[in-house]
Amino acid sequence: MESETRVRLSLIARCAGVPALVLAGVVVLRWLVNLTMYEPVVSLIGADAYFLIFEALWWLKVVASVLLVGALVAGWWEGSRAWAPGVTLLWTGMLLHWTWWFVSRSWDIWGFSRLPMDDPGADLDRQVQWLASLDLATSALVDLIAILLLVLGARRLLGAARSAKVADSPA
């Protein structure tokens, strides 16, 4: 019975670790694609290509997140102490990424709506540039932390699954 539980946990660990790495990779790819959005590149591949790339990355991120949550819930359901390494890091990384995604799109965190758009004498360019830079830097930092948490959690979880598999194999 112990061997069967280890095999299930090893499988569940892989089913959580791989989507976590995919999720982290998609976040990195999204940033890289964002960095290529300059006029020469956009005119070369077209705006529709960017739309398709972002759409594909979005769905890949959603599917990886759903698989990750499903695997983490399945691991919790099994309720083994062997499941513990890396799980907290995975939950934290995923929740950090998705929470920031929701908050940054739902609320005017930086106060763009409070800018005096109808005042012709206002120095809006500098204010907008400062707020946009602040938003970009914060989003990059949050995503970097989420990526690190996801990768470290996946490595710990996959390493624990690998060592459980080695410990279970006959000598």
Image (tube, rainbow, N blue to C red):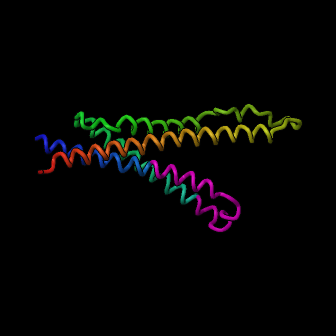
Is residue 56 magenta-colored?
no
Relative placement, left or right, of 93 versus 117 is left
| Residue projecting furthest to the right | 121
Q: Which percent across, then down, holds residue 18?
A: 36, 50
Q: Residue at x 47, y 42 (%)?
A: 148
Position of the N terminus by quadrant: top left
Decide: is 101 above or below 171. Answer: above
Relative placement, left or right, of 72 versus 170 is right
Question: 19 or 114, which is in the foreground?
Answer: 19
Relative placement, left or right, of 70 versus 99 is left
Relative placement, left or right, of 38 versus 27 is right
Q: Residue at x 41, y 49 (%)?
A: 21
User: In this figure, what is the number of numbered marks?
Assistant: 0
Q: Which percent across, then down, holds residue 113?
A: 71, 34
Q: Residue at x 56, y 35 (%)?
A: 103
Q: Which percent across, then down, holds residue 39?
A: 71, 61
| Residue projecting furthest to the front | 171
Q: Which percent across, then down, holds residue 26?
A: 48, 52
Residues shaded magenta: 24-50
Decide: is 101 above or below 26. Answer: above
Q: Main secondary structure of the magenta part?
A: helix
